[in-house]
Amino acid sequence: MAEATILFADNDHDFLNTRAEFLEQAGYRVLKALNVQEARRLLEEARVHLAILDIRMENDDDERDTSGLALAKDLDYRCVPKIILTGFPTYQAVREALGPVLDGLPPAVDFLDKREGPEALIQAMERAFAQSVRINWGLNVRWGHREELQPPHLVSLISPDVPMEWLADRAGELEDLLRKLFYEYGQVTLGRILARRTGWIVLSAFAYPPQGPEEQFVVACGHGINLQTEEACYRSFVPSKAGDRTVSLTKSAETVHFGAIAYQLGRRVVEEVTPFAEFYHQHAADAVAAVVDDLFQVALHSWYEKEREERGQPVEALCQDWLGPDERELPQAELGERIAGICRAALAAGVMGLSCSPHKLVFRTPDGTEHAYLNPAPYLHEERVATSPPTLCGITHGRLDGESVLVDGTGQTWVLDFGNSGPGPLLRDFASLETAVKFDVLQGVGLAERHELERRLLDMQHLAGKVDAEGASPEVEKGLRVVGQIRSQAAGVVGPEIEPYLVGLLFCAAKCFLCHRPELRYTKGEMVVFTHALLSAGMLCRRLVAWEDRLEDLPTQAANSLWIDVDNQEVWVEGRRVTLTPQGFRLLKYLYDRANQLCTRAAIAEHVFDLDSSDVHPTELKLMERDQINTNLSRLRRAVEPNPGHPKYILTVRGSGYKLVLSNVPSDGDN
């Protein structure tokens, strides 16, 4: 077994050299360590398949010295099988070494007395390789259809900063990973890279058992910690049954630095799937819009039905976590300097039109027209952009973008990349995909056209509204239509109110422009994206804060209770602007005009829903009333009530109808 590498760590120099020579004669490559520090260094830098550790690595005369066992129990090296070797075996040490663990291997797979001799050690090693190392040395690996995906190349994609002197060992380790993952097969062929982000790639793979047909997989491969998180999130949050859209985790493997997970996409032909971004570029807007519908109505439908709840926190508080600790903790002055740095870098790269001051962003169109927006730094730092709770939460994918969504030739979709999956605001997936379309998927679109796209989207008054795409350039028109479809799907899940959704977009935009690293230089195309994200954040801030500032000019009822601006057909509830569907507004207006008065179900049916009883059987009319009124009242309460489960404004009068309760409006019994 010429490929097998052993780490042998023992503080007895003579014993270490003698045993190592014996193992080398048996065909193993042996890396020697005389102390724990050297053993750790070798585990970090070298390609190690099995470790043999002396239990007393510091002092043979100290019965309390279990430094070798402590190293064996270190979770950073849990995937390396270890044999504990000592001249001082005790029951307690054996129990600690061989006891079960919750995850991965036990601290040691075997325990030997040094006096048992080298033959016993060889036998223990053979057992460990067969039962615990489990590397298929005979697996025939094709590294791409044209051998273009060799291990050094894949390592450079996952870990571009790996030192050159470590590259050979890392490449060998990555090869070991695939030989572990496909242990039961005779051949595996890597197809193509479907997705890539820092520390993580996704490839198609085709595996061939010794007997039987080809099996197709999508393999996520990357840094071990990333894949551990992805697997944990998959097992905790991904619905187990999603019909033919089930993404099944079939196997996983790990080495010290890498991890891999093999998924299967139901019965689909993996060779026929493409990332969403690629599908977007190859198909017309109608086809892409249909894919958006399929994604949210089919592939992710079962996700959004799980653990739905309304949390008593504003959406912006929950969105803060999207930025990550480094971005959240930026002082306002540094955040402002980062924004100014993007404007300077954009100008240096030839991206014209955007300038900034501490409180303002100014965009100048090619014809010289200036548009003033807000510098987002103060609003992100001081949390001045606010919406009122509650926030509708549930299980979300957490990172929808152009690569985490796969599409086949019929427009059916699957999702991958589960490292961010879990509880959160349900608007997150929709805002994330819209952000990806605008910043990452659009190609060949300059900043002026991107500004026009954002301006038209900000004209929307609610999520289910129509997007004005007339007269836009073809690429912008396509982007508007696709984003409009994303927002329409969002309205069906989180409701039509647009302000919380815009807050989600603001944090997505901030996450994008804060990825700009001042010490690096970027191409003009890359700087267009960073500048677009910054401009989008400024435009969003101006619209959100404009609503906030309007409160100063509205009646106190708008801030303290429920108030309808009849002229503008706007609804304000305790300081927040609520967006309703036309039907919802009509219903609320009817109740509002009769505040603190009983509105019977029959009257609501007649005057709001135009249900004519003259030609309808009474039983059928009653069913129609029930369906129309119950559905719309439920939606209205979700939109306007601070706590829909315990309404304070729209109350049910059992057996009669409903009453809108407003403390500052006289009731029908008052004089």
Image (tube, rainbow, N blue to C red):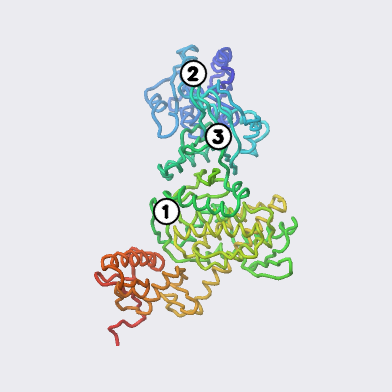
Q: Position of residue 443 (x, y in %)?
A: 66, 53
Please tell me whether mark 3 sits on a helix, a strand or a loop: strand
Question: Where does label 1 land, which residue?
Answer: 394
Question: Where does label 3 land, which residue?
Answer: 258
Placement of the C terminus among the 4 image quadrants = bottom left
Q: Tell me the mark number nearer the camera, choosing from 3 and 1.
A: 1
Q: Residue at x 64, y 68 (%)?
A: 360
Q: Quadrant of the rendered structure where residue 47 is?
A: top right
Q: Tell me the mark number nearer the camera, choosing from 2 and 1.
A: 1
Q: Tell me the mark number nearer the camera, choosing from 2 and 3.
A: 3
Image: 403 above or below 344: above
Q: Quadrant of the rendered structure where residue 200 is?
A: top right
Q: Residue at x 45, y 54 (%)?
A: 424
Q: Residues within 10 Å of mark 2 (few under 14, many from 20)?
A: many
Q: Amino acid at mark 1?
A: Gly
Q: Amino acid at mark 3?
A: Phe
Q: Position of residue 504 (x, y in %)?
A: 52, 59
Q: Position of residue 612 (x, y in %)?
A: 33, 72
Question: Where does label 2 land, which residue?
Answer: 125
Q: Position of residue 50 (x, y in %)?
A: 52, 24
Q: Residues within 10 Å of mark 1 (few under 14, many from 20)?
A: many
